[in-house]
Image (spheres, rainbow, N blue to C red):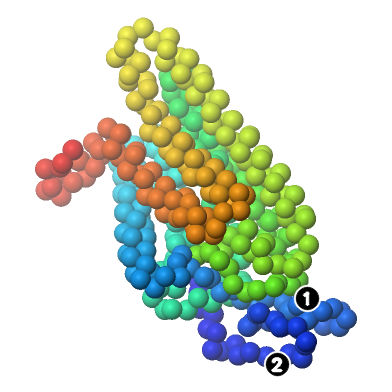
Amino acid sequence: MYHYNEETHPKKPIKSNKAVPNKWYSRNKLDPSMSSINQTMIEGFRLKGVSDVAGLQVLIFLLVLLIYLICLGGNLTILLLVFRDLHLHTPMYFFLANLSIIDISGSTSALHGIFYIFTTHNHMVSTSACMTQLYIFSSITCNECSVLTAMSYDRYVAICRPLHYHTVMSQRLCGLLASACWSYGFIETIPIMFFISRFSCYISIELDHYFCDVLPIRDITCSDTSLLDLYVVISGNLLAIILLSLTITPYVFIITSILRISSSTGRRKAFYTCSSHIMVVVLFYSSLVLQYMVTISGNNMGSTKIFSLLNTAVVPMLNPLIYSLKNKDIKSALRRKLKLRGMESLPF
């Protein structure tokens, strides 16, 4: 994605009394009376990266690479087990496979900029590449919220209506829920891309981030951002209130049903079936809330990047670990696959 070479786009002379911070620009010929800063239209961005401290760049790169490889290995393992083991062909693991695809896509989209910058020392990214990354990452975040909501409903049916589980959670319904989850994310992000595409000028080409996100781009534009701000506030609140409510509400009924179980063994078994999902939901929404609070509080960008790394790298890495370490079916499926290859001794 990052194949935009700064050497092939040299500076163009511009006659103006104002200093233009952008290295990449083109003339806006629609209104010659506009000031020089408004006559510049961005053709590319310069990603600042994670840290300006030279001594920390290697350490950060190695740490992020290790986290990404664990994330990739864990989620790919779950995908292979779900698709190849017949015992895991159930609605619960169908949605878990969707979550693994989302984690791989989201972390790859956000983190590959760090890898590219470190290996090539080229911080420039074309506008089209930046917009593509922004669209994919924003859509994937919405998709994850939706899939977690669908998984909550699946756990509700499994615990509160166990006798009707396979009837209610049919293949058709699971397919419709998954299609709705994926469609919602990619449709919800379209207005954001439309508003950003209407930005006609920028005061700088430097994004103080390691990937293209909405707020860093908004901070460097000199165009009117009122419509974008309004949409982000409305859609963000709807995402937080509606989807989080739809995720939490089933667990109110689940906890009520668990408390009605007379035997402690039954209560423990029922809670065990949904504990992994509860941990994933808490981890995901906590990282989003922390990142949002740091951003709107006006703290330094370094703190924002740290919480962004938590959301884009650490959480996708922990999700497969939580499900594999606390899930007997996943561990049993892994044992069966390894046993076929003569690797019977496992540390779990």
Q: Nearer the viewer, residue 157 or 166?
A: 157
User: Which residue is under mark 1?
Assistant: 38
Q: Are marks 2 and 1 in contact (CB under 8 Å)?
A: no
Figure check: 162 above or below 340 = above
Give the label on residue 13, or none: 2
For label 1, the crowd category at 10 Å Cα-Cα, with few meaning under 14, some 14 to 19 and many 20 or more, is: many
Residue name at image x 76 percent, y 77 percent: 37
Residue 166 % position (x, y):
44, 25
Give the label on residue 330, or none: none
Residue 105 % position (x, y):
46, 56
Query: From where the camera sits, is residue 95 visible?
Result: no
Residue name at image x 32 percent, y 43 percent: 321
Residue name at image x 61 percent, y 66 percent: 131
Q: Nearer the viewer, residue 265 or 151?
A: 265
Left or right: residue 83 versus residue 168 is left
Figure check: 330 above or below 141 = above
Q: Nearer the viewer, residue 168 or 253?
A: 253
Secondary structure beneath label 1: helix
Residue 19 % position (x, y):
71, 83
